[in-house]
Image (tube, rainbow, N blue to C red):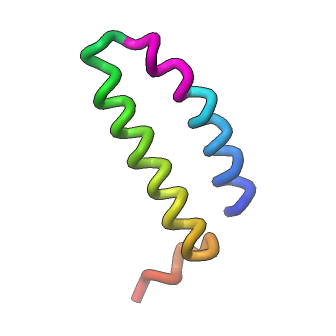
Amino acid sequence: MKKQIKRARMFFDEAEKGISELSVASRWPVSIQDRHYQSIFDINTECNYNQSSTQN
């Protein structure tokens, strides 16, 4: 999972550069989604990449 998150962050970092090229109306929702997915990566990292750590 660690490698997958690292790879995903790489793609998100690269894609983030293109947000400024979107239409003004599209920038805000795309930026919010970017932050949302980055926060999911952060949560997985905090849980030591263990998806089952929060499941009952």
Range of residues picked out in magenta: 16-22
In the visual, does 29 lie left or right of 51?
A: left
The percent position of residue 36, horizontal first and vertical second, equals 39, 48
Give the residue at x 49% y 66%: 43
At horizontal 40% and vertical 89% (from top left) the residue drawn is 56
Q: Residue 23, image x and y in percent? A: 33, 10
Q: Residue at x 70, y 61 (%)?
A: 2
Relative vertical location of residue 22 with respect to residue 53 in this rendering, above or below = above
Residue 35, by quadrant, is top left
Q: Position of residue 38 (x, y in %)?
A: 49, 49
Compared to 3, does 19 lie above or below? Answer: above
Q: Position of residue 9 (x, y in %)?
A: 62, 44
**Furthest residue in direction left, as rendered:** 25
Res. 19 image quadrant: top left
* Residue at screen point 46% across, 57% down: 40
Magenta-colored stretch includes residue 21: yes
User: Is 38 situated left or right of 3 in this image?
Assistant: left
Spot the residue most to the bottom: 56
Residue 4 painted magenta: no
Q: Is residue 19 left or right of residue 30?
A: right
Q: Is residue 4 above or below residue 12?
A: below
Is 2 in front, or is 23? 23
In the displayed orientation, state which residue is furthest to the right: 3
Left/right of residue 53 with respect to residue 55 in the rendered view? right
Q: Is residue 44 above or below residue 28?
A: below
Specify the quadrant that holds the N terminus: bottom right
